[in-house]
Amino acid sequence: MLFEMRIRLGGDPRGFGEFVSLRQELAKLSHPACPDVDWARVEQWCLTLFEQNGADLQTAAAFALARSQRHGLEGMAQGVALIESLCCQWPALWPPMASVRLDILAWLFVQWQPLLRNRALSAQNFPALLELDTELARLQQRLDQQVQPPLVALHALRQQIESLVQRTQRSSVALGTLSLPPREPAPSLLMPVVILPPNPMPEMQPARRRVALWLGTAAA
C-alpha cells in the first residue's frame, strides 16, 4: 500500500533560514574546488521548508536533486513526480515569473545529466529507467501545455535516458536476464503526490487597519 505525499503549495521561501542554508550548500556545485555537498542536509532543509512554507519550485528542484543523489533512479523519478504535480498548479506557483521557473527547471535537468552518465547501470535498473522515462514524458507533456518553446535541457535529458534504456535493454537481452517485455514499465511504486492549496492569508483586524493607516499618515 502506498501512502500519499501531501504538500501544501507554498510562497516565497527567501525569508526562511533553511532556504538560506540550502542556497549556500548548493553553491558548492559551482565552486572551483568542488567541495562535497551534504545531500542529506539538503533534503532535510527542503522537507522543513515544505512543512513551514509549503512547496515552491526552487525548493522542489533542490529536493529532487537531493533525492536523486541519495536514492539514484528511484529518487530521480520521485523528484520528477513532485515537479509534475507542482506544474499542475502553474498559475499559482512560486516564483511567479515564467522565465525564472524555466531557469530553475533547466538547472535541475542539467544537473541530472552527469549524474546519469556517472552511474553504473545494469539489467536490474531497467524497470527504474522505464519508470523515470515515463515520469519525464508526463512532465514534458505538462510543460508543453504551459510554456513555449520546449525546454532544450529536458529534451536532452530524455534523449540521454532513451539511450540508457536501449543500452540496458540490449545488455539484458544478451545476458538473458530481462524479465519485462520491451518498453513495458513495471507498475508504478512511486508515492502519489497531492498538492494542497496554500493557506489563506489571515484577515487584518479593523484596529490593525486603523493603526496601519495612522502610520502611513504619520510617515507622509
Image: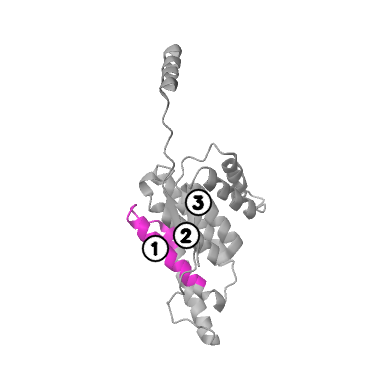
Name the residue that disc number 3 marks.
60
Does residue 120 appear left or right of residue 201 in this picture? right
Relative image position of residue 139 (x, y in whole percent): 40, 60
Residue range corresponding to the magenta coloring: 128-156
Relative image position of residue 15 (x, y in whole percent): 54, 36
Name the residue that disc number 1 marks.
138
Q: Earlier in the sequence, mark 3 or mark 2?
A: 3
- The vertical placement of 147 against 12, above or below, is below
Name the residue that disc number 2 marks.
80
Magenta: main secondary structure equals helix
Rendered residue at 46%/63% (across/down): 157
User: In the rendered structure, which amino acid carries the disc numbered 1?
Assistant: Arg
Q: Earlier in the sequence, mark 1 or mark 2?
A: 2
Rendered residue at 59%/63% (across/down): 71
| Contact? badges 3 and 2 (CB < 8 Å) | no
Question: For this rendering, which residue is in front, 48 or 63?
Answer: 48
The quarter in which the C terminus is drawn is top left
